[in-house]
Image (spheres, rainbow, N blue to C red):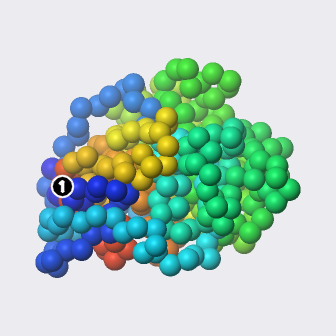
Amino acid sequence: MASKLSFTCIPELPLSIEKFPKPHQRIHLFPLPPPNFSPLCSSLKNNNNSSCSGLSVHALKQEVIQTPNSDSTLDSKAAFPASSKLVLVVGASGGVGQLVVASLLNRNITSRLLLRDPEKATTLFGNQDEETLQVQFSSGLFIKGDTRNLEDLDPSIFEGVTHVICCTGTTAFPSKRWDGDNTPERVDWEGIRNLISALPSSLKRVVLVSSVGVTKFNELPWSIMNLFGILKYKKKGEDFLRDSGLPFTIIRAGRLTDGPYTSYDLNTLIKATAGQRRAVLIGQDKLVGEVSRLVVAEACIQALDIDFTEGKVYEINSVEGDGPGSDPQKWQELFKAAEFK
């Protein structure tokens, strides 16, 4: 059973900054029961059967941080100071990527989008100031690129970038999303390999969204999800990043819930909520469950500023209850509690 780390109702932004009247407390978890497994879900991501090295965080040490309930709302964009970061979001039009961009905009953090179809950005995020959302070069040309094609990844795309969040992915089973050679091998392995090869060594952090199950894709239920190789190829992508020498954090998500919000505009994204699944579990290699896309997006952004998450692999689920919202201290405690010792 999972313990509850309540994320109270989040009326405005993906994940809220919550104020809790009582101090949070550390509690022990019962074993997490596997939810109903859905083999047609496209959300599980990752690869290979090798175990994570000592740098991996086989998280959830049978405890998480529990916080009391509260009726909090998200602070507005004005509440966040200007940031010196320039975050490249790869896969920004996807279910998690859109939420990452919306949250970065709300935090006054400049993001640059790498999209196959950059004109989608206007539809999704509206006309934003170039100081906060970059979809064009100074020349007026759109920043356009497909990670599956190394020649698309011109060095100019990465100029000035300080951090990267990569949320690319496809479905585990053949679907319309596979049209145009959008298969797990091309997206989750070749695309990640090309991206990592093109990134500058000056980056402060690369956060890669992956999937639970990548280290055990020959075991049930993961072997079902891996029938077409998605977990194997995701693990290969993970390993390539780990061996690249770049400072990284890998977020392995459970089965994704909430969204994807792929046909909504920025206002809808900002008002999106995680339903009842706001309580966060950062778990071990045996973690099985679901996670809100909103929680995954928040975990990626929080990891950028937590030094000890560098070089680590975290698995993440969410359950019913209140949670850390956008509170950096609570996220730091969650990541810390999950450290493999």
Question: What residue is rendered at 48% in x and 63% in y?
Answer: 106
In-front residue for pair 147/338: 147
- Label 1 residue SS: loop
Up-down: is 264 above or below 108? Answer: above
Across and down, in percent, residue 29 comes to 16, 59
In percent of width and height, residue 269 lies at 43, 48
Image point 57% across, 57% down: which residue?
Answer: 165
Q: Using the image as rendered, state which of residue 292 and residue 249 is in the foreground.
A: 292
In the rendered image, the quadrant that contains the C terminus is bottom left
Instruction: Identify residue type, mark 1.
Output: Gly
Q: Determine the image quadrant of residue 299.
A: bottom left
Numbered circles on residues, count = 1
**Residue 265 seen in render:** yes
Q: Which of 120 and 35 is in front in this view?
A: 120
Indicate the position of residue 294 as horizontal and vertical percent values: 38, 51
Residue 193 visible in the shown view? no
Residue 290 falls in image quadrant: top left
Q: Vertical placement of 48 versus 240: above or below?
A: above
* Residue found at x 75% / y 61%: 158
Question: Residue 16: x percent and y percent?
Answer: 33, 63
- Label 1 crowd bin: few (<14), some (14–19), many (20+), radius 10 Å: many
For this view, does 133 lie left or right of residue 227? right
Q: Residue at x 27, y 69 (%)?
A: 18
* In the rendered image, the vertical position of residue 53 relative to residue 34, given as above or below: below
Residue 255 placement, left or right of 29: right
Circle 1 residue: 321
